[in-house]
Amino acid sequence: MIGLPGVASTRSIGMIGALDLKGDSGYLAELGWRVYSEAQRRGVYLRPIGNVVYVVPSLNIPDDDLSELLSVVRESVAS
């Protein structure tokens, strides 16, 4: 997802991934909530905290479902 316009950096540990979005920083920043709303509209639940969006899939997620999840995250950030 790095290289995607609007994403400053990414990181992960285990199955938890985080996207740092460009823009205002701080706990109350709104950009993460916009990405969350767009992903929710597409059927995916994310965890926004300020301009950081967390992706926490189940440990036993099938590869096809994980690919679909990440596609929705990518599309939600791009919109």
Image (cartoon, rainbow, N blue to C red):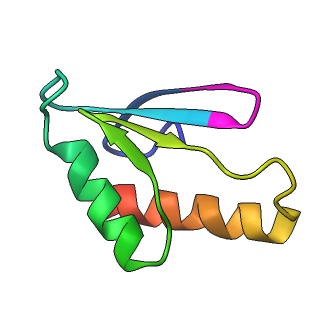
Whole-percent x, y for residue 39 in the image: 40, 66
- Residue range (magenta): 11-16
Res 32 quadrant in image: top left
> Looking at the figure, which quarter contains the C terminus?
bottom left
**Relative to 43, 61 lies left or right:** right
- Residue at 23% of width from left, 51% of height from top? 33
**Disc count in the image?**
0
**Residue 2 spot, x, y in % from top left:** 52, 36
Magenta stretch encompasses residue 13: yes
Helix, strand or loop: magenta stretch? strand
Image height of 29 relative to 40, above or below? above
At 45% from the left and 35% from the top, the residue drawn is 19
Q: In the displayed image of the protein, which residue is found farthest to the bottom?
A: 42
Query: Which residue appears at 44% of the width and 66% of the height?
Result: 75
Front one among 41 and 74: 41
Question: Left or right: where does residue 7 sit relative to residue 33?
Answer: right
Quadrant for the N terminus in the image: top right
Q: Is residue 53 left or right of residue 1?
A: left
Find residue 67 and report its horizontal and vertical position in percent.
72, 64
Q: Is residue 13 left or right of residue 41?
A: right
Asked if residue 35 is positioned above or below residue 71 in the image, the reply reads above
Say whether residue 9 is magenta. Answer: no
Q: Residue at x 17, y 22 (%)?
A: 25
Measuring from the top left, give residue 34's x and y in whole percent: 22, 56
